[in-house]
Amino acid sequence: MGRFQLLWVLLLFVGTSLWGKTIEVCASCEVKSITKGVVLAADYDTLLIKKGTYKEFNILIDKPLTLLGENYPIIDGEEQGEIIRIVSDNVTLDGLFIINVGTSYTSDYAAIRVVRSKNFLIQNVVLEKLFFGIYLEKSNHGKVYHNKIIGDAVDEYNSGNGIQLWYSHNIEVDHNIVQGVRDGIYLEFSDHITINNNESTNNLRYGLHFMFSNDDVYTNNTFERNGAGVAVMFSKRIKMVGNTFRQNWGTAAFGMLLKEINDAEIVGNTFEENTIGINIEGSNRIVYKNNNFVNNGWAVKVLGACYTNSFINNNFLYNSFDISYNSKLNDNKFEKNYWSNYTGYDLDKDGIGDVPYRPVKLFSYIVNRTPETIVLLRSLFMDIIDFSEKVSPVFTPDDLLDDMPLMKRTR
Amino acid sequence: MLKILKYSFYDLMRSRWSYVYFLFYLALGFVLLFLNNDLSKAVITLMNVIIVLVPLISTIFGVMYFYNSREFTELLLAQPLKRTSIFLGQYFGVASSLTLSLILGLGIPFVLYGLFRSEAIWDFSLLLITGAFLTLIFTVLAFIIALANENRIKGFGYAVLLWLFLAVIYDGLFLLSLILFEEYPLDNYSLVAITLNPIDLSRTLILLKLDISALLGYTGAVFKSYFGTRMGLFISIGMLLLWTILPIWRLAYMSKRKDF
Amino acid sequence: MIEVDNLHKKFGKNQVLSQLDLRIEAGGIFAVLGPNGSGKTTLIKSILGMVVPNKGSISVLGKSIRNNWKYRQEIDYLPQIANFPGNLKVKELIRMIKDLRQKASNEHELIRLFMLEPFLDKKLGTLSGGTKQKVNIVLTFMFDSPLIILDEPTTGLDPASLIKLKELLLKEKNNGKTILITTHIMQFVEEMADGIVYLLEGKIYFKGTIKELMAKTEQNDFEHAIAAISTYTTDA
């Protein structure tokens, strides 16, 4: 269904450029402003915006149009408010450079806002000095492709999100670069969204943030050095495949936060050098497969009730702590993972260690309780304590073990 | 002093013990690499070994050397030599031969396994620097203990006790105090506590490299500036230097007043 | 040559030397005698700077030895127990000591005298006690220093070597050197010493020639005189 719709959208775009006429906009042209161009244009026309600076805001696009920038014309909103608002179906924005969106504490001004519209395409757009970047509001079947959003946010309370989806469904967000905003990509009540090949880095809060959104897929994205990583909250059936979560450092920072997430699939991702690789709270029936957890403080931190999750064929490499639990109960399965901290042997040479591996150390308990004790990491005293706990578990769940630890890492 | 250093060093280079020490590290390096086949993992295991074994071996070796070379020392004392040169020369002789055994013993297997082509080279160099510091520190502490105790058994006892205290008991007491006073702000206290123990200092240096992600998980501005910036690195190295220089100075002072 | 004034030394609670005054003039062989624990070795080691006195002053060749180490260039010392670093070869040890002292030496003559040639390439750890003592003697006498201090030089020596040692001592004495010896062999003292210094309980109990001692104790025999002096109380 989704693919068919996309095809239809594409056909439509091809159609418009064939049938519509082109209106040129430039300083020396007949039409000197974009606003005027939009007023003059008929449905399915193309506005060819030439190189130059256009000091305009509140540009209302209320008919199916294509706004095509030539050599990245600058639309300078002079911090007056919203810059482009799309309220019609079948609108395309291409090759624009939009700067100086107004900041407000009462309304969420965006560089580009799409309201209750379908079949839009926003591509090759560069946004700088923005509040909100691309804001999709109750709009479906659109595509946000190959845009670059560079914010300079300093504080969370007066900054906006790079790409925001609100009650919008069936959208494709692909090949975008988002940095320096509050949340790189934010989804609220938005289902059937695909988010692929984006780079969301150095954002104040989350690189990607899901709230109450179901059946979404995100693959091959990179999330690096965000304030807190990626948050997936109160959502169902999310697929997370082949993403990279790196260097999210700090007190409440993680590669990924899962909160009240059910039936998700987390496959083939890499979590590298995060304070916490994945932080899980109240999430059930999640499959973790073929992920790499490398050099994290905590590879996986489990808080609160999490049931029937399974960790299969993951690589846990050189993490300070592999798994941390805050309760003695365990209903999650660990099987056939590779643990670099495993010290067992494989006498029958079947590639599976003969002694089970206990991924939860007593020390991780102590650190949860008294965080300052982290400075005792890797001290001989701690090793001795951990060893005695390993021999006879008192504080850690005694059924939490990987019965079949792999001897070699999986590819 | 350089002459004494030279003779002590040659003397040690011929002794069975430096070979045992060298071969031990050589074997350790090869075994670790053979079992893991992975430089990064071997470096981590090695780190655990280094911060525990290097102090132990340096302490015992230092005490042993001091007692065994007593006659040599007396022979030297009757020569027209400055006392401090005699003791510091011997100390540096021992320390440098131990360091050499450590660096060669571990370096050879790792280089053969392709260290220079690996990213682990920085971690490994840091490890060796830390090992060298620990050798310098624990050898001088051993010399001080041996100089202060004529009785060999007593000297050995104190030396092993010192190692046990700094390697294990100190951290145990430290942990206990942290848990007992967990309601109070403890970040300054814990940072000071780890700088007062050379083994903990070396551990911090290694943590900064291997576990920075975990260290930054703690809430607290002091921790953040300590581990998050270069401050931790500089303070740790500075304190390790102090831990080396002050005992050496003490050894020189004691050596001037000691009767033979 | 040596001047010791008001020397005090305590090891823990044990007062080893107290108020010791001693003057040794240049030239001649002087024996420092006394029962076990009387402080002979401590006195010698104080002179050598190996023991740091609690009180008092010592000067050698007219210079105070406090915080001074260069004066040892003028002393040859033979330590009591000849234990050397076991890993060194004899000739290496000799070379090392020469290197440390940077002084002209005549070790070849002495090696020949004590017939040590076959041992030059042996490690010191493998040598017998007597051979070690011979090496010790070589090391002591190979330099030409005005003051020679010998602590139990006769230990472990065979009679032939003992004779050679005595000849050596006489030769050095005739060269005008000052020689300080501690020993328990009274015959050796009687034969060699020009003067004796008798120590008891950390004090100089007697200083003079052997004749003076015998006259004082009214004994005809030196050994008896020595035995008698410790019970001789009129002076105390």
Image (spheres, coloured by chain):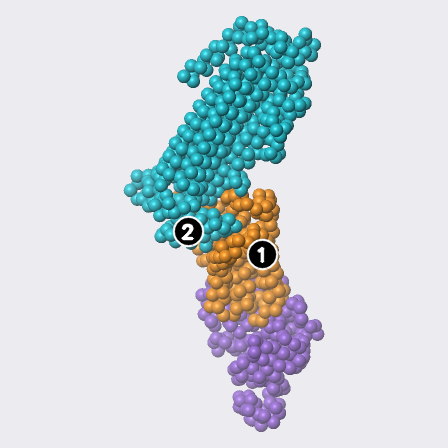
Chain colours: A cyan, B orange, C purple
Which chain does tag 1 point to? B
At x 50%, y 57%, the residue is B180
Element class at badge 2: helix
Q: Which of the image's four quarters has the C terminus of chain B?
A: bottom right
Which chain does tag 2 point to? A
Packing grade of label 2 (10 A; few <14, some 14-19, many >=20) is some
Q: Amino acid at mark 1?
A: Trp
Q: Please tell me the numbered disc located at residue A18.
A: none
Q: Amino acid at mark 2?
A: Asp
Packing grade of label 1 (10 A; few <14, some 14-19, many >=20) is many
Do pointers 1 and 2 mark residues of a single chain?
no
Q: Is residue C126 above or below residue A208?
A: below
Foreground of the two, A405 or C229: A405
Pointers 1 and 2 in contact (CB under 8 A)? no
At x 59%, y 66%, the residue is B255
Residue bearing the label numbered 1: B243
Q: Is residue C5 above or below residue A355?
A: below
> What's the CA distance linking mark 1 and mark 2?
29 Å
Answer with the quarter of the image where residue A97 lies: top right
Residue bearing the label numbered 2: A386
At x 48%, y 46%, the residue is B107
Q: Position of residue C189 (x, y in %)?
A: 56, 83
Element class at badge 1: helix
Residue A183 visible at all: yes
Q: Which of the image's four quarters has the N terminus of chain B?
A: bottom right
Residue B163 visible at all: no
Can you tell which of label 1 and label 2 is closer to the viewer?
A: 2
Answer with the quarter of the image where residue B216 lies: top right
Q: Position of residue B182 (x, y in %)?
A: 51, 53
Answer with the quarter of the image where residue C213 lies: bottom right
Q: Position of residue B72 (x, y in %)?
A: 53, 66
